Amino acid sequence: MPRNYIKKKTNAYEKEKLMEAVDMVRRGESIRGTAKQLNIPKSTIADAVKGKYKHPGEPGRKQVIPKDVEDRICRALIEAARQGIGISRQQVLRRVSDLCKRVGAPVKKLGKDWFEGFKSRHPEISIRKPEKLTTTRARMVNPAILKNYFDELNGIFENTGLGGLPTRIWNSDETGKQFEHDPVRVLAKKGSRNVLGRTTSNRTNVTIMGCVNAVGESMPPMFIVKGKTSRSLHGFNTEAAPEGSMWGFQEKGWMTDSLGEIWFRDIFLRHCGTERPQLLILDGHSSHETLAILEMALEENIIMLCLPPHSTHALQPLDRSVFGPLNSSYNTVCSDYLNENPLNSVTKWTFPGLFKEAWIQALSVANIVSGFRACGVFPFNPSAVPQDLIAPSAPSDVRIQEQPPLSHENNQETVSLSIASNQSQDSVPSSADTSSPSNVPTTVAVSPSQPQLPLDQPHVTASLICLNGESAPPVIEDPALLLQLITSGKCEIFSPDVSGVATIPMPDEQATPSQEAWTGAIDDLFTLKFINSPSSSSEVAHEKSSAKKRKGHRLLTSAEIIEEKRAAASKKEIKNNKKKAKNQK
């Protein structure tokens, strides 16, 4: 189709309407009157009555790529996007061009015109910009890890009865905020090349630790600013921050072990209430599982459950429904503040008040509750995690299986059987018998995996002959057996040539690509390939070692974890004492 094609003005009509016009003409109506009544060109009706076209009512040329093949390509594109390995426009054109070459379709190279037509025929697809997803996160959110995590969570609920007490189910996590925000969308002249939005040049980062429960309540946040001494807090208007907030400092503005202990003791235990036990769900950051925190939790009857690594985007309530709205609210609040006066700027003094406004808007009861529901925590629902978050783990699903030993039963190669109608059981055809086509037996292909082949019957001969140095097929004399094999689909008949050798039609000899050829090529170009078996023992060892290194969820307050932490702390203390004694000498 030419690029500058201008569509002609034609009367729009459906195929059913044209068929109705043909029936009216065949019943005696005039072509001119029918065309005027149904608003269809009379020449079109006349051609349809004469049977001039094979598919009347279908405008345009016949598609080179069949419609069902395009439908399969469309489904493959959608599935690839779900699994996080979407295919771009250029990749589609390249792969479909290769597809046409493989099946022998009369297409050299596809371009923009075909792609635009493909999109118009499949309005369910569109070009989208994907979100970032690391390979590690894509691999870790898989059905096996999710099942183990929800089994552990269900066991906690059953043993403690916390499944029906949402006020005692908590989730905590950190997020970061910079003074420089992302400007919100604004109205501007259509076609403008550059639309500017004011921001602050200061990129100071502040870490905020938040904690919420399944009923929609939230604890005061903890702010960690960059600095080496308490003097780094002097410029902040801490009074304007959310009520009850705690402020700390660290050299890089990050959460550390000591700050984590302060948060757990002075914020969590103070605001979680007096009811026991309680459950705290958090990620595996080192500041969340120090020995001091675990001993305080064990003493206070606080159950701490660590999420599987690299899965917080799917299993952490704060990440699912709170921190996203918090970022949007913060950007909106900062944009409104900077637009009020050209001299305004986000600084240490103004940041706490702006963050407080965004904090109140984002940490609503509806947002918090929806996060626990979306993660399947409360109400407990292991199937709450959407398939769109699980699908990216499919390409990295490595299945280690042992190859079955090769045997006669597993061999699916075709064996040819020759049918001789006028030969005795002991006779063997000679080379002279194959000189004439009339004396050549018909060759039948039978799968050897069929154990019910009755070659030991009296009227069946299974002798082997040698043609051109190769083993010839066994001979079958029983017509009833031959008919049974053909009707049951256990054999395939080929026409031999003059020399008596069966000629099997090759795909290249076909005039048009078959459905099987399209299907096989699509599977090769658009379907993901999984590793079903390793090529060497070293790959098996590597897979086992990688599986050992990957840690799943952990019950941090279990006796095993606490003893492990105590042993590590004791070992570290002994090492420090030896080092100190050595330095004193």
Image (cartoon, rainbow, N blue to C red):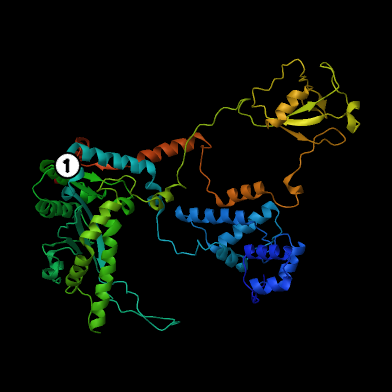
Q: Residue at x 49, y 56 (%)?
A: 78
379 sits to left or right of 44:
left
Q: Residue at x 34, y 46 (%)?
A: 383
Can the viewer see residue 564?
no
Q: Residue at x 16, y 53 (%)?
A: 258
Quadrant where the C terminus is found in the figure:
top left
Residue 536 in picture, x, y percent from top left: 52, 35
Question: Which quadrant of the figure has residue 418?
Answer: top right
Determine the secondary structure under disc 1.
Answer: helix
Task: Give the residue type at disc 1.
Answer: Glu
What residue does disc 1 label? Answer: 573
Vertical arrangement, residue 357 with respect to residue 137, above or below: below
| Mark 1 surroundings within 10 Å by alpha-carbon count, few (fewer than 14), some (14 through 19), many (20 or more) | few
Quadrant where the N terminus is found in the figure:
bottom right
Residue 584 in picture, x, y percent from top left: 13, 45
Vertical arrangement, residue 425 with respect to residue 91, above or below: above
Vertical arrangement, residue 3 with respect to residue 321, above or below: below
Can the viewer see residue 205?
yes
144 sits to left or right of 305:
right
